[in-house]
Image (cartoon, coloured by chain):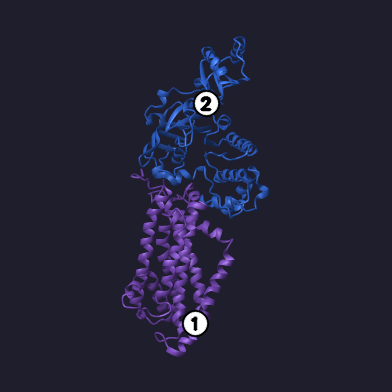
Amino acid sequence: MGDAALPASVGADAPGARGSHGRPLWLRSFGYWAYQYKRTWRSSITVSFLEPLLYLTAMGIGLGTLVDHHVHRVSGVSYLAFVGPGMLAAAAMQVGTSESTYPVMGAIKWIRTYHAMLATPLRVIDVLRGHLAWIALRLLTVGAIFVAILAAFGLVHSAEAVLAVPAAILTGLAFAGPIAAFAATQEKDTAFPVIYRFGVVPLFLFSGIFYPITRLPGWLQPVAWATPLYHGVALCRSLVLGQTPPAQSAAHAVYLAAFAIAGYAVARVTYRRRLVV
Amino acid sequence: MARSPRPLAERRAPLAERVVGAERPSAAPLVVASGLVKRFGQFTAVDGVNFEIERGECFGFLGPNGAGKTSTMRMISCMSPPSGGVLRVLGMDPATDGPKIRARLGLVPQEDSLDLELTVLDNLVVYARYFDIPKAEARRRAEELLEFAQLSERAHDKVEPLSGGMKRRLTIARALVSRPELLILDEPTTGLDPQARHLLWDRLFRLKQDGVSQVVTTHYMDEAEQLCDRLVIMDHGRFAAEGSPRELIERYSTRDVVELRFATPEDQAGALELGSLAERMEVLPDRLLLYTDDGDALLGESHRRGHSPISGLVRRSTLEDVFLRLTGRSLID
């Protein structure tokens, strides 16, 4: 690649290259995603309601009745109260992943939205920021709906639970950042089902949503501990149940933020390599 | 419309002199390139070219596939950084002022990037928003441009089912939504049927009348003759020739071409002596091409000498003759 001297304006931040007036450039890219959402928002919002409803009913009330009957308490709360906040983190992972796989590939290869944007004043970094900002907004709606449903199930006891919404955003971005960075390197979508089968599904099962990870075999516990979902689950749970010291919650948040920020930093590079040739 | 060509030596003058050049006090060139290079790894796609695109003109890049046309266009569009040389677009440096320059360009890429799921109208509005054009104004311009592109009736249809010609017209309309000073069209009519092409040419001509400067790449010679005031023929990353279509024909071909087709190879071999009557002769497997300024006279002489081709055609030289002469007849993949 003859990219030794990549001009900043095509890729990264260029001094004085910000749109000299008007909306910030990343906001214009964000605007596209918001605009195109209007054709699917109904089904999308419906799913955001139904999914937690179904899971909480099945896992919490169905399975939970059984668990509570035999074990009485998991971590000192009802099984529904234990599982519910974990499912919130799982939903965030799900949204963060799905929004950063096929949509990114589509914007590069199929619909070529990114290319259309780059013919306008937008730069690669604006394209990336706008897309991640959109994913954050999707996570906000999904998280808010989820917390509202948790409240409807009687699982929310303090105002602190509202903080579970930003926690869900952080959890989703811890996946969306790195996965978007990866998606931008792909020629085909064949890796995405692999991410689901060998990434999302095992994390869903082994990150402490359905049982404390202390129940895992000893060697598996550090693995679970290292995954971002474990920290998302722990953070969401502590905020909803209001029973964990703030310092520990902060540590979880920092761990998630590190994934999100590292993903963003790598995505800046992979996006530029892919889009500026 | 034809411009008198400036001597080559003058074009190669140091960049600074030309940019400041006092010969056209009215307006500086829209694009100035000097020693422009684009490399991909070991491959040199554009190999040190010099050109200027003036305000108000339609400038063409012709060439076979892989000649470096699209790479050049992408550099002019400030989407692809040059690997060497100097490039100024609208007087600015793409390396530092990309967003500012792109705000004043309209790009019609070779590969469509329309949003197939959005409606025709929404595609224009969404694109206008990238330029921060207020919503109401974006909508007003979009409707106006759909009129111009003859797509008003499809305004609320999705893009997906539109024909190739409609999609191209929509892409052009989209590129115009920001009222660009320079419209950059990369193979605007490739893959379109003749009706669609003629409609597009008509629209592009009207845009030029309205003062929108254009850069076009194409490998259709008739398109270049229709649209371009000035053009360069590119081959292997360099310019093989530059000038107006008329100048190029005068310089690299003759006024007429006589095409003789024979029944047998022996008959054709017997007619090779006609070569001495023409400025240049090309021997193809199925016919002879004789380049001369007076085709009728040559065809008459051929009859007098007793040659009897199954068909004998006198036609005017075209840009295609120039193109094939400069870039060769062999297939390039």
| Residue B114, placed above or below residue B235 | below
- Residue at position x 38%, y 61% in the image: A263
Q: Amino acid at mark 1?
A: Gly
> Is any part of residue A67 visible from this angle?
yes
Looking at the picture, tell me which residue is in the foreground, B280 or A266: B280
Q: Quadrant of residue B289?
A: top right
- Residue at position x 49%, y 58% in the image: A103
x then y, percent, for residue A95:
48, 66
Is label 1 or label 2 in front?
Answer: 1
| Residue B115, placed above or below residue A146 | above
x then y, percent, for residue B64:
49, 34
| Residue B184, placed above or below residue A40 | above
Q: Is residue B122 left or right of residue B131?
A: right
> Is any part of residue A154 visible from this angle?
no
Colour of chain A in the image: purple
- Most extreme residue toward the top is B304
x then y, percent, for residue A169:
44, 68
Q: Do marks 1 and 2 both belong to one polypeptide chain?
A: no
Q: Is residue B164 left or right of residue A91?
A: right
Looking at the picture, tell me which residue is in the foreground, A53 or B289: B289
- Residue at position x 44%, y 43% in the image: B78
In space, the residues marked 1 and 2 are separated at their CA atoms by 78 Å
**Residue at numbered disc 2:** B244
Label 1: element kind: helix
Q: Amino acid at mark 2?
A: Ser
- Tag 2, which chain? B
**Residue at numbered disc 1:** A60
x then y, percent, for residue B242:
47, 27
**How many neighbours does mark 1 have within 10 angstroms: few (below 14), some (14-19), or many (20 or more)?**
many
